[in-house]
Amino acid sequence: MIVKGRSLTKAFHRRCDVVVVGTGAGGAMCARQLARAGRDVVALEMGGFHRPSEFTQREDEMLPMLFQERAARATKDMSVTVLQGRGVGGSTVHNTNLCKRTPDAVLDEWARRFGVSGWSPAEVAADFAATEKDLSVSVLGEAQLNAANRIMKTGTEALGWKGGFLSHNRVGCVGSGFCELGCAFNAKQNALKVLIPDGLAAGLDVYSDCEVTAVKVERGRAVGVSGRYVDADGLPLGEFEVSADAVVLAGSAVGTAALMLRSGLPDPHSEAGRHLHLHPGAPVAGVYDEPVLGWKGIPQSWEVMEFLDFERDDKRVWIVGNFAHPIGTATNLPGFGPEHARLMGEYAHLVVFTPMLHDRTEGRVTVTRRGRIQLQYTLSAGDREQMALGLRESARLHLAAGAKRVVVPFVEPVEVTSERDLGLITAERLGPLELPVLAVHPMSAARMSGSAKDGVVRPDGRHHQVENLYAADGGLFPTSIGVPPQISIYTAGRIVARHVDAALPRAS
Amino acid sequence: MSGAAREPSSVAITRRRLLRWGVGGTLLLGVGSLVWRARRAPLAEPAWAAGPWKVLSRVEAVIVAAVAARLLDPGDAENAAAPDLLAVTRFFDRFLHLAHPEVRRDLRALLGAFDGVGPLSVGLPGRFVNLPLDEQARVLVRWERGPHPMRMGFTALKQLSFMAHYGRDATWPALGYDGPIVPRGYAGGEGAWFDPAWAAADGDDLVGADGRRRKASAT
């Protein structure tokens, strides 16, 4: 069953085998797997439970409903906006359905540098395949390219670059183009549509609007969690406790690390919250003669792989099409007043490409004394060079595709009308708040490692210091993975669930 | 005399240090005095500024509206919608109400600082809300392109103003944007997905304080 915390009027206490904190890709998968294994599982979600009929396709209503901090989460210095999901299904409700496995080279690096066992390409292949089957993953084709992505494909082919169609988890998509505001047509084969119902059918209980504030530890063992149930606006209504034989944290790299810090869990090497990766990206807008209506159709169906090579440090840029509705576009275009309004007047003619970094920069999640999450993240010199490369090549792609001009939205915007102008885009310009930088893939802030000296959890998801405590989200990844992470996170949930189940005693 | 003995102690007052303190203190007093005078300058408060607001003071409401008016000024942009300043101010108020207390504190401090110190950043006396429109734009440009703390303030004000403005249907025709394609209350996507067998149940009749589960009732 699903219980909506916003409707509760009394404090509650539950007892179960496993409590899972978070219902996004990792949490929902882990909870479903454990429920199917016959465990009594409670999943707690800080956000609401929303049906497709509530996805109104309006930014003013969906941004506060589906995103952390009403879509205003950012790094402490405000240089990176970090969009993260909130609600049953987590970020899988608002993501754009991109499905790529963790690259083999990345998995090999985890084994080599961090002693991560059990995650070699051969060992996780079956789990990836099972995840893809769960989510009905398939490769898109020509018929699903919208006008903006068709332009991107044209440019890619004109330049002779490496690119291709992306794989997605969507069935029955009508191409409305509102993926990032939740799918009103329920075409996303995500945690909300697939895994939560599966779990419920197996006996899973989901409590929405229940924000966990502490992991309870007794004599070195996790014994449950406590928190508060909240109203539709996230304001507290009352308190709850859930006691369990095992606790799985899956509230995202940010949420899990913050909960570990708030709970004061033993952390002799100060690893919790460190090593945050974000996959930062920045928009590059091409202005085309003809209206493109870039908000219509599937937003991201084509990728450019020309500048992404997992074996090389100087090719860490993935370029993908992107498009936002008016609020998202307006907040990322440069300037204000009449100049900005005129640029917005060209909205229907804009096509946006986003270079996303396979980042080496390591940031940090911290929590203030009053419990506020803070993210620290400043692009390293090497990543600034890669970002500049990505911006230049995205602009070149626009030119090759026929853009009449390209706007790189620096505070003092760079307008590119020919390849001669590309030299204006340099790493030196990339100081904090010089450019709108966005991130939707926080990772690594509770990373796994064979050694407690450089990781928070073991390769099976178990906490290095606290018994019966696990993590099962993108926070596990020891490094950036360089590709959209949902398949990797779902799969992590599957792997960790198997270890949790194996560690718990069976009732005789 | 040993080398260590020749080093001035960390609290020793040298002539240079005294001069530096003196100049710094005078500057600080000067700036503080200007800000204080600016904050005491008369302020035109339209009737709507009285609220009711959950968080904003009357003065803060006026500051929000003045900042938003400049940020969202469409000028001669074709067909662009004029800002609804009351709606923007309401958006700020609601955002502040629901924000973490530390965010609320910081944003309210920003509003005060922007109004009081903003003009000084371009060498003007007085408060932002009382400046001529072109001078207000100069202050915003200065904060947009100035040192990092100013940029942070500008970014916060811009993002909240634009979130409030471009969420309004009235702003869309000028963009060529046709808005949502589903009517309100559309439930066509429920279909096969919504199975009454696991219908969400509202209410605390499900799990009481005693932890006992009771029969679920579907909504």
Image (tube, coloured by chain):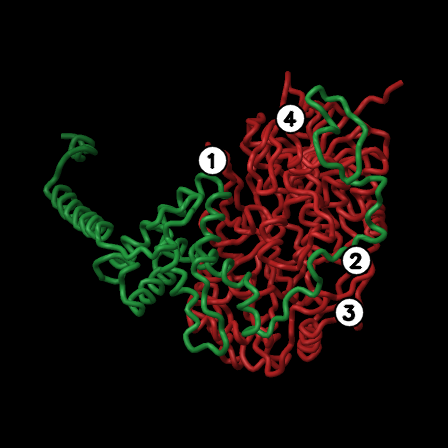
Badge 4 amino acid: Lys
Which chain contains the residue that carries disc 3?
A
The residue singled out by tag 2 in the image is B188
Assign the C terminus of chain B to one quadrant of the image.
Answer: top right
N-term-proximal mark, 4 vs 1: 4
- Label pair 4/1, CB-CB below 8 angstroms: no
Badge 2 amino acid: Gly
The residue singled out by tag 1 in the image is A368
User: Do tags 2 and 3 sit on the same chain?
Assistant: no
Give the Cα distance between marks 1 and 2: 44 Å
Nearest to the observer: residue A395 or residue B188: B188
Badge 3 amino acid: Gln
Select label 4 or label 1 by which is in front. 4
Give the Cα distance between marks 2 and 4: 35 Å
Look at the numbered disc 4 and give the secondary structure of its residue.
loop
Nearest to the observer: residue A313 or residue B94: B94
Q: Give me the chain that's green.
A: B
Badge 1 amino acid: Thr
Which chain contains the residue that carries disc 4?
A
Give residue A10's mark: 4
Residue drawn at (50%, 80%), measured in percent from left and top? A420
Select label 4 or label 3 by which is in front. 4
Look at the numbered disc 1 and give the secondary structure of its residue.
loop
Give the Cα distance between marks 1 and 3: 46 Å
- Label pair 1/3, CB-CB below 8 angstroms: no
Disc 2 packing (10 Å; few <14; some 14–19; many ≥20): few
Give residue A144's mark: 3
Disc 3 packing (10 Å; few <14; some 14–19; many ≥20): some
Q: Give me the chain that's red.
A: A
N-term-proximal mark, 4 vs 3: 4
Select label 2 or label 3 by which is in front. 2
